[in-house]
Amino acid sequence: MAQIAIKRVYEPAVPQDGTRILVDRLWPRGVAKDRIDLWLRDLAPSDALRREFHGHPEQWETFRAAYAVELGSAPAQATLAILRDTIAAGPVTLLYAAKEEVRNNAEALRLWLAGHGFPKP
């Protein structure tokens, strides 16, 4: 079964990353397009949710709950089908640009995926 890892987009790529998937709504500054295999923008938190959570890591559980609601939207669900197919083909690494390495949208997404039948980290 394929693994799902997370990594800051600014870290160098390694072969173990598998398919590198950006899960941010905004393209990260200074990152060349050839460093990312796939951009699943519809899996990123909305701009409003991203702004509300930015700088408030103590609201982690509130953020995760609101993000889970957004992942139930039609665009996110359609994009999850793409992610499921990509995971079936091999390992993936979810990329994020946030400076926070523990509580970020990629980690929230990975936890949500694990709770919904996707491979565990």
Image (cartoon, rainbow, N blue to C red):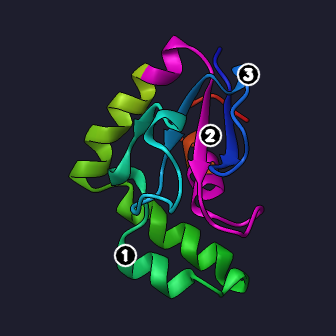
Q: Residue at x 70, y 69 (%)?
A: 99
Q: In the rendered structure, find residue 114 and report the number of the disc placed on it.
A: 2
Picture quarter containing residue 46? bottom left
State which mark lies toward you, 2 or 3. 3
Q: Residues within 10 Å of mark 2 (few under 14, many from 20)?
A: some
Q: Percent from the top left, x then y, of residue 101?
A: 76, 62
Dot 2 or dot 3: first in sequence order is 3
Q: Percent from the top left, x then y, of residue 118?
A: 56, 31
Specify whether residue 117 is in view: no
Q: Residue at x 63, y 66 (%)?
A: 98
Tell me the CA gap for discs 2 and 1. 24 Å
Q: Secondary structure at mark 1?
A: helix
Residue 87 vs residue 112, the one in the foreground? 87
Q: Percent from the top left, x then y, of residue 72?
A: 34, 54
State which mark lies toward you, 2 or 1. 1
Picture quarter containing residue 27? bottom left
Tell me the CA gap for discs 2 and 3. 20 Å
Q: Magenta stretch: give its range.
A: 86-110
Residue 83 included in the magenta stretch of the image: no
Q: Amino acid at mark 3?
A: Gln
Q: Amino acid at mark 2?
A: Ala
**Cβ atoms under marks 2 and 3 closer than 8 Å:** no
Q: Name above or below for residue 14 compared with residue 89.
A: below
Left or right: 43 as drawn, with respect to 9:
left
Q: Residue at x 65, y 83 (%)?
A: 59
Q: Residues within 10 Å of mark 1 (few under 14, many from 20)?
A: few
To which residue does mark 3 refer? 16
Q: In the rendered structure, find residue 47 and report the number of the disc placed on it.
A: 1
State which mark lies toward you, 3 or 1. 3
Q: Secondary structure at mark 2?
A: helix
Residue extending farthest left: 74
